[in-house]
Every structure is written in C-alpha cells, then in structure tokens.
Image (cartoon, helix red, strand yellow):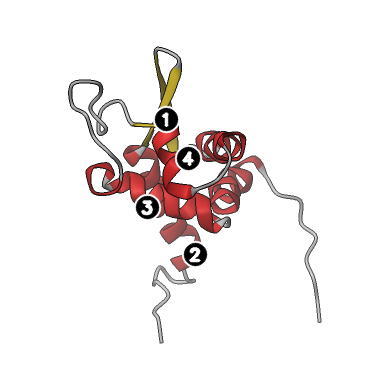
Amino acid sequence: MTTYDTPATGELLALLEPLKALANPVRFQVLQWLAEPEAHFPVDPAVTDPRAVGVCVSHIQAKTGLAQSTVSAYMAVLERAGLVRSTRVGKWTHYRRDEERIASLVEEFGRELGALPGGGTARRG
C-alpha cells in the first residue's frame, strides 16, 4: 500500500479547515440549526433579527446542553473555518451562518472532488 505524504498547500488547507470543523457532530448540528434559526432557537425580534445578527451564544449553549466555554470554543472553530460570523450585541455574542462562504465551499468541494480527467464529474453508484 502506498501512502502519500504530500504537504498541504494553502489552497488545500483552506478546504480542509471547514471539513475539520464539521467533523465534530455538535458543531455540524449547530451549523444545521443556524440554517433555520427561527425553527430551533427562541426568537425575539425586538432584541435581534436571527438572520441578520444571529443567534445568541447562550441560546446555542442551552440547546446543546454543553458548558458555555465548550460552546464558545466550538463557535470559534466554526468562525475560523469561515462557516459562521459573529456579532457583539451588548455583552453577548451572536452567531449566524456565512451563507456566501458556505456556498463557495460547496462549489469548491464539488470541483475538487468531482473532477475527473477529460472534464467529466464523478457519479454516485
């Protein structure tokens, strides 16, 4: 069996970071919840718009049942990977998905994983 120890380039690292972030089931679930924040979190339009500003980290923490420090660390990983954006509202941090970045990553993954010699794309069997 042959293994390849090719060092990851900047482009490859940019693709791998979001995958590593999503390898954790809780982070993946939070990103799914943030796709429809109104369906998964308490919403008070008088305080913030969950689509424009995001969901308060305290609501994410309550839904996951994890410690605040763990949730904050998870959200920081998602933010570094470019999957969410944060906004401060008073003393609270709110998170929302970065839909533009997610769409770009999906397109890039498709190009990188689906490209075959001759311009075709891989098909599922």
Q: Can residue 83 be seen here?
A: no
Task: Name the residue: 40% across, 12% down.
Answer: 90
Furthest toward the top, the residue is 90
Image coordinates of residue 123 in percent, x first then y, are: 39, 79
Q: Are marks 4 and 1 in contact (CB under 8 Å)?
A: no
Label 3: how many residues lie within 10 Å, few (<14), some (14-19) or many (20+)? few
Q: Marks 4 and 2, how far apart in space?
A: 34 Å
Q: In which quarter of the image is the C terminus?
A: bottom left
Pick whichever, 18 or 7, lies toward us: 18
| Kind of element beneath mark 2 | helix
Q: Against 25, is 49 above or below?
A: above
> Going from the N terminus, do you reach mark 4 or mark 2 first?
4
The disc placed on residue 113 is 2
> Going from the N terminus, do you reach mark 3 or mark 4 first?
3
Q: Quadrant of residue 68?
A: top right
The disc placed on residue 6 is none
Q: Mark 1 points at which residue?
A: 85
Q: Marks 4 and 1, how far apart in space?
A: 17 Å
| Kind of element beneath mark 3 | helix
Q: Marks 2 and 3, how far apart in space?
A: 22 Å
| Kind of element beneath mark 4 | helix
Q: Name the residue under label 3.
A: 32
- Going by the numbered disc 3, the residue's amino acid type is Gln
- Going by the numbered disc 1, the residue's amino acid type is Arg
Label 1: how many residues lie within 10 Å, few (<14), some (14-19) or many (20+)? some
Q: Name the residue under label 4.
A: 61
